[in-house]
């Protein structure tokens, strides 16, 4: 434990050792701080994860013996069902996470002005840039990755309970129960999805941070009304719909084309086949997503918006 | 610049400081210097410009003119400055959701000069529990907590803006006693703004009076007796005393208290009873005398 500190002590002049708390320690403290203040950041995902595990108990599936039903004696179909269950299990968790994250980002720089504690935070040697970045990182990186881990763990628990119910014959035996390789591939696919979403939605998150740093009250209105008004004005003045297209592209449709996950074309799927997400993992070209120009443009916009938020926090003088 | 130079040069040096809000000139060409190891009271009525000066010193507002704090410009070097400066603003409320233990964890995590054991020692003498949230504490206890955090930081400059506002007398007295006994030493400088002058006048080594954005008086408390004399003049001597141009006079029980600046005491002695005015009296005299 003491080795890294000992080496830095030799490497760094003593003055900077006493004058600077290491950036990682400061950042770690700032991130913990956010979880103290905004308890919904960890309580809400935890509740959803527990609920998702518990859904295994009321779950009822009838016998799959209707006309054209998949043949669940087929091992490929059983793996497919396994991967779909893991995936479906995470969806509500990510949906709740995006809501929690959005509301958190809208509030993160507004709360300290609302409760007038900003001068206390500003009395400590933490720069405005570090503070703003810590809040952005919590909403955009720490929370999604935390939910990713939580979803993976709760997925395993769900599978374990599912297997118990299958063994006691209260659920039909349609899935493989456990397949480590398929599980790893689904996790890989999900992690890829989370990382791409983080990068893709970064400008949206940064815009929320900026609004949060800027408004005096009614953050939610200031976040939602201006785009709506802009859309209406554009429609009335020019009869065009570029803004709504752009917003729709950035907040929803665009991310799918960046992800480049092409579902297996329907014509190649034969009747009664359960498509495995593990196959999607095998077929996705991950490097392509990171060459998408819109992804990088968005990141540049995010950087500009964050810079503006930092400037506002640094220089605003109405406390 | 080595440490020796720094201790000799002023901790705060302001030259021609200006700041206006719209058409209101909050601070107008203010110049002063604050030396290390002093406790300076920045004293003025409400709206005098104290808070503006306070914000300027801490890099919380923009202003015109020159200002150097610990050799740094608070406008451009605020981040470095905050390593050596601590402050309590009257409006700086500790966040209500914060637990006492979290407050200690936080400051320990971000401040390289925070001595956690010092803060816990201080808190042990109070009724504050580690697990309490700020919202559960009384106003006096919140100030004690804030003080515990601040006093455990080895800072060179401590700036307090109306730190005891809204506290009862016991807490106020305790606050200043702690400040003086547990914190202050020759290496440190304390600047505090208040309008409760009486309570802190024994504490101060220097006073800067400010009114309507101007410095009205800037003096050390030690040299006040040489500069200012308060003479209680009987009514028959009043006319004679007025020839010596007091800058302020006040009638008390049929006698007149006159305040003189830069007069020889021997010249004033025949007029009545001489004494050195208290900071509070001098403050009133200076504020009223100017307008």
Image (cartoon, rainbow, N blue to C red):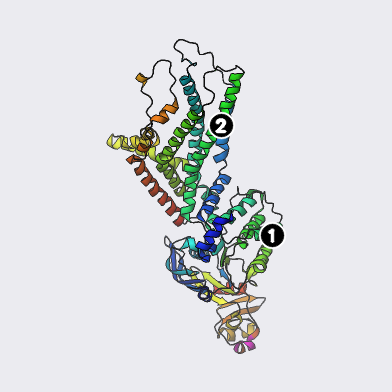
| Residue A109 seen in the current view | no
Question: In terms of image quadrants, where is residue B185?
Answer: bottom right
Q: Which residue is mark 2?
A: A154
Of residues B201 and A260, the one nearer the viewer is A260
Residue A49 spot, x, y in % from top left: 56, 32
Q: Chain letter for mark 1, please.
A: B
Question: Which region is colored magenta?
Answer: B267-271
Measured along the vertical axis of the image, is residue A279 above or below residue B10? above
Above or below, B203 against B129 in this view is: below
Q: Is residue A162 positioned above or below B193 on the image?
A: above
The residue at 46%/34% (across/down) is A188
Task: Say which element carries label 2.
Answer: helix
* Residue drawn at 43 percent across, 47 percent down: A210
Q: How many marks?
A: 2
Task: Report the chain holding disc 2.
Answer: A
Q: Nearer the viewer, residue A267 or A294?
A: A267
Q: Is residue B54 magenta?
A: no
Give the quarter of the image for residue B163: bottom right
Q: Position of residue A137 (x, y in %)?
A: 48, 46
What separation in Å lies between label 2 and label 1 (alpha carbons)? 44 Å
From the image, tell me which residue sits under label 1.
B121
Judge whether residue B98 can be spotted in this image.
yes
In-image side of A36 versus A208 (left or right): right
Relative to residue B141, is residue A177 drawn left or right? left
Magenta highlight on residue B269? yes
Q: Nearer the viewer, mark 2 or mark 1?
A: 2
| SS majority, magenta | helix
Task: Specify few, some or many for label 2: CA neighbours under 10 Å numbering under 14, 14-19, or 20 or more.
Answer: many
Toward the left, the furthest residue is: A238
Q: Residues within 10 Å of mark 1 (few under 14, many from 20)?
A: few
């Amino acid at each position: 434990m003491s080795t890294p500190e000992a080496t830095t002590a030799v490497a760094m002049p003593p003055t900077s050792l006493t004058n600077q708390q290491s950036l990682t320690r400061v950042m770690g403290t700032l991130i913990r701080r956010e979880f103290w203040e905004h308890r919904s950041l960890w309580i809400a995902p935890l509740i959803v994860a527990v609920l998702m595990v518990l859904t295994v108990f009321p779950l009822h599936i009838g016998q799959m013996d209707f006309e054209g039903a998949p043949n669940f004696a087929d091992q490929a179909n059983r793996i497919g069902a396994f991967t779909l269950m893991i995936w479906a299990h995470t969806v509500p968790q990510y949906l709740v996470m995006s809501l929690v994250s959005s509301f958190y980002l809208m509030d993160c720089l507004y709360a300290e002005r609302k409760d007038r504690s900003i001068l206390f935070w500003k009395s400590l040697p933490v720069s405005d840039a570090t503070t703003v970045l810590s809040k952005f990182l919590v909403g955009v990186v720490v929370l999604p990755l935390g939910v990713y881990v939580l979803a993976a763990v709760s997925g395993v628990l769900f599978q374990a309970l599912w297997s118990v119910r299958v063994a006691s014959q209260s659920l039909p035996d349609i899935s493989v129960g456990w397949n480590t390789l398929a599980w790893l591939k689904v996790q890989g696919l999900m992690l890829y999805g989370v990382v791409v979403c983080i990068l893709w939605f970064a400008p949206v998150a940064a815009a929320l941070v900026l609004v949060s740093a800027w408004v005096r009250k009614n953050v939610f209105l200031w976040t939602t009304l201006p785009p709506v008004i802009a859309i209406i004005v554009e429609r009335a003045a020019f009869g065009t719909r570029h803004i709504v297209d752009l917003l729709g592209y950035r907040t929803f449709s665009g991310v799918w084309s960046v992800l480049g996950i092409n579902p297996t074309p329907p014509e190649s799927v034969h009747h009664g086949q359960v498509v495995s997400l593990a196959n999607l993992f095998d077929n996705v070209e991950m490097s392509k997503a990171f060459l998408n120009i819109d992804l990088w443009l968005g990141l540049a916009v995010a950087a500009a918006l964050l810079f503006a938020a930092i400037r506002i926090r640094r220089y605003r003088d109405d406390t | 610049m080595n440490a020796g130079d720094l201790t000799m040069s002023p901790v705060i040096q302001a030259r021609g400081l200006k700041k206006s809000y719209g058409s209101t000139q909050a601070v107008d060409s203010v110049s002063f210097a604050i030396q290390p190891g002093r406790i300076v009271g920045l004293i003025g009525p409400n709206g005098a410009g104290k808070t503006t000066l306070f914000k300027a010193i801490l890099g919380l507002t923009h202003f015109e003119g020159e200002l150097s704090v610990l050799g740094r410009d608070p406008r451009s070097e605020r981040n470095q400055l905050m390593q050596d400066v601590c402050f309590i603003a009257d409006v700086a409320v500790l966040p209500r959701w914060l637990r006492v233990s979290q407050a200690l964890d936080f400051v320990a995590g971000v401040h390289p000069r925070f001595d956690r054991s010092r803060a816990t020692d201080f808190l042990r003498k109070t009724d504050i529990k580690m697990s309490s949230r700020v919202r559960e504490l009384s106003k006096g206890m919140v100030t004690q907590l804030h003080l515990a955090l601040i006093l455990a930081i080895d800072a060179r400059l401590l700036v307090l803006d109306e730190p005891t506002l809204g506290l009862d007398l016991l807490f106020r007295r305790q606050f200043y006693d702690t400040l003086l006994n547990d914190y202050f030493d020759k290496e440190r400088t304390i600047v505090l703004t208040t309008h409760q002058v009486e309570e802190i006048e024994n504490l101060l080594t220097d006073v800067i009076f400010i009114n309507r954005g101007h410095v009205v008086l800037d003096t050390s408390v030690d040299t006040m007796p040489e500069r200012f004399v308060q003479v209680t003049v009987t009514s028959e001597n009043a006319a004679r005393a007025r020839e010596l141009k007091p800058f302020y006079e006040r009638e008390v029980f049929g006698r007149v208290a006159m305040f003189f600046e830069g007069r020889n005491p021997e010249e004033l002695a025949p007029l009545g009873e001489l004494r050195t005015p208290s900071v509070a009296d001098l403050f009133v005299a200076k504020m009223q005398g100017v307008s």
